[in-house]
Amino acid sequence: MANIVISEVCNLKCPYCFASQFLENARTHTESVFISLEDFEARLDFLDASGIHEVRLIGGEPTLHPRFTGLVERARERGKSIVVFSHGLMSERALACLESLPPGECTVLVNINATRQVDQPDEREMTQRRATIARLGQRVQLGFNVYSTRFDLDFLIPLIEETGCQRAIRVGLAQPILDGKNAYLHPKQYPIVARRLVRFARNAMAQGIRLDFDCGFVRCMFSEDDLNVLEQAGTLFEARCNPILDLAITGEAIHCFPLTGKVALPAGSGMDAGQMREQLSRQTRIYRSAGIYKECSTCLHKQNGVCSGGCLAVTLRRFQHSAIRLDVPASILSIPGQE
């Protein structure tokens, strides 16, 4: 798995956005805020070399790319399925392009969140999103990033019923930006979030809707009873944190957006996706002995690999650590057959 950044701009300003520092840095270091067709072809070559058959398009807002439809068409010519991470407020041209793809070969993760510090999304934005989701139907999975303990997911159930999108909701925890400011949860708030998620999971289960958990969750925020409820609701809970591989327009491979400027591999390393993940994991391994709580270092769940100890960005923020500099060994830069 690898995400391809094709746009470094977004027309929303979500308070929790963990990519804002990346987007700000990118605007000061690159000549273009959109990926070129030539560089996009190079990303497709990278996916082929890595044995990856899925093109995951991210931003910013990826549908803002002026040649978005051309990028999708080129990926389809390579036999790739398409995944788009979007806020759902897209142009007619982008919407029609995605609507033309077979549902089994296109997934649009539409993030349903407030763009301001309020409990519910803006109604005008929701009206447009609702129309987009209804047209894309089974191509859409709803997503929600939790950045406040006051969140309410109940409105997503009728939205799924009305629009006919996938009966699954991807839930993420807003994580801190190490060198910036954004709205995010303090680990002390995680148990409160867990109780609300479990309550919603019970209601959603009755409607045949499941929750899918993104990275950054920890095992101890849920009780054994909570985990039983989630299992009965069809949720596969994994307390993981691992390199996402966000490929920037510059070609740099970023561990994940919250660690922008801290953990990345330079462009032109010659590695495939598996080698990149291994190198990023190796360079961050020393910090994995800790976690978001002081108890993580002696936790049996962590020692047994059941829990990673939460988001690495939260762990590093605990220690207010300096930047991680990566030195890639020459033996890794030189891959047999690519000299």
Image (cartoon, rainbow, N blue to C red):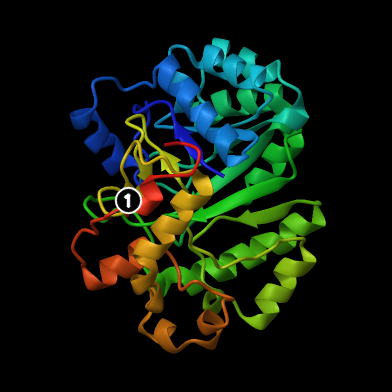
Question: In front here: 294 or 233?
Answer: 294
Q: Position of residue 19 (x, y in %)?
A: 35, 42
**Which quadrant holds residue 128?**
top right
Instruction: State the residue at coordinates (30%, 35%).
Output: 23
Front position in the image: 179 or 264: 264
What residue is rendered at 20% in x and 31% in y? 29
Q: Answer left or right for 215 relative to 26.
A: right
Residue 300 position within the rendered picture, expressed as x and y whole percent measured from the top left = 54, 88
User: Looking at the picture, does residue 298 appear above or below residue 247?
Assistant: below
Q: Quadrant of the N terminus?
A: top right
Q: Position of residue 336 (x, y in %)?
A: 49, 44
User: Residue at the location (75% across, 68% down)?
Assistant: 231
For label 1, count other residues whose C-alpha is less than 10 Å away and answer few (under 14), some (14-19) or many (20+): few
With 121 as the anchor, is 178 left or right in this view? Answer: left
Q: Is residue 292 above or below residue 132?
A: below
Q: Is residue 294 left or right of residue 222?
A: left
> The C terminus is located in which quarter?
top left
Q: Report whether 337 appears left or right of 259.
A: right
Q: Which residue is mark 1?
A: 330
**In the image, residue 42 lies at what x, y percent?**
46, 25
**Residue 105 appears in the picture as rendered:** yes
Q: Secondary structure at mark 1?
A: helix
Against 121, residue 132 (above or below) is above
Amino acid at the residue labelled 1: Ala
User: Residue, x 48% and y 29% (percent of image)?
Assistant: 43
Number of numbered labels in the structure image: 1
Whether residue 255 is visible here, answered yes or no, is: no
Closer-to-camera residue (252/300): 252
